[in-house]
Amino acid sequence: MRLEGKRAIVTGGASGFGAGIARKFAAEGAQVMVADLNADLAAQVAADIGGIAVQVDVSDAASVAAMAEKVQLDWAGVEIIVNNAGVTHLPKPMETVTDAEFDRVFNVNCKSVYLMARAFNPMMVAARAGAILNVASTAGLSPRPNLNWYNASKGWMITATKTMAVELAPKGIRVNALCPVAGETPLLSSFMGEDTPEMRAKFLSTIPIGRFSTPEDLGNAACFLCSDEASMITGTAMEVDGGRCI
């Protein structure tokens, strides 16, 4: 029960790594808000873990503000924010990515972190306590070709994590990031371009441990970084990648 008494919001919490984090947090005693664009899936996960489901578009200021208002009314505050929602573009040469694809990647992967900070930092600052966790990627540390703008968005998230950590530390708030390798999530086929045994073998050959990241892997790492056990850790980008970045 390492998160007992804590209130946590997990964006993109209806599937993949987000669902794994939400389930682990609930198992460790947290009240969890599963925030996702897919309302039906969010409701399913929330029902499974005894949490709350909220439909939100994290790239839209009004939608994030509405969620913050609900949190203030229902919970009167929050201790943990997990910025997990993310998208990618299909593998292709960087100059062939369309304006719409580029904007979607940066709005969901980057602007959302800004919007969440604007909406929820005041609650945490008022309490002088809290933990923010940004789910980045090994793509921001050791980029693969043909995913240029996705890679760049995750590099942005790692830098944002470190700058947020420096600014918020005197206010009692820790900020860290997780850098998973590709995992068994809805985005896997998008990263690979095609989900075939040959393509999976190619990806797995770059991971020394020999398997993809799982939602459970991310849940365990997230639980540690957001718990009081990590009270001296801020500004780190933890690789949960089976050795991919070595």
Image (cartoon, rainbow, N blue to C red):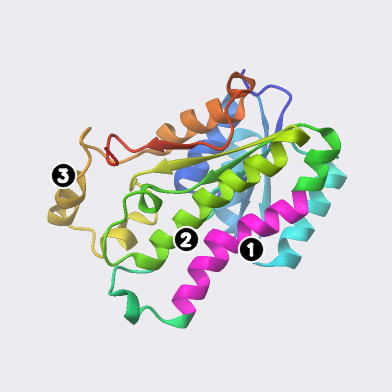
Which secondary structure lies at badge 1?
A: loop
Q: Residue at x 40, y 52 (%)?
A: 140
Where does residue 3 sit, x and y in percent of width and height?
65, 24
Q: Residue at x 47, y 60 (%)?
A: 153
For badge 1, the amino acid type reads Asp
Q: Answer yes or no: is residue 75 visible.
A: no
> For the residues carrying marks 1 and 2, which lies nearer the camera in this image?
2
| Residue on which disc 1 sits | 57
Which secondary structure lies at badge 3?
A: loop
Q: Residue at x 49, y 33 (%)?
A: 219
Q: Main secondary structure of the magenta part?
A: helix
| Residue on which disc 2 sits | 153
**Foreground residue, 180 or 73?**
180
Q: Quadrant of residue 234?
A: top right
Q: Which residues are magenta?
A: 100-120
Q: Is residue 124 above or below residue 64?
A: above
Where does residue 182 sit, x and y in percent of width and height?
33, 48
Q: Is residue 111 magenta?
A: yes
Q: Residue at x 46, y 74 (%)?
A: 102
Calculate the distance from the C-alpha at mark 3 to the C-alpha at mark 1: 35 Å
Q: Is residue 195 above or below residue 44?
A: below
Q: Answer yes or no: is residue 105 visible.
A: yes
Q: Which mark is residue 205?
A: 3
Give the mark nearer the N terminus: 2 vs 3.
Answer: 2
**Is 148 situated left or right of 31 in this image?**
left
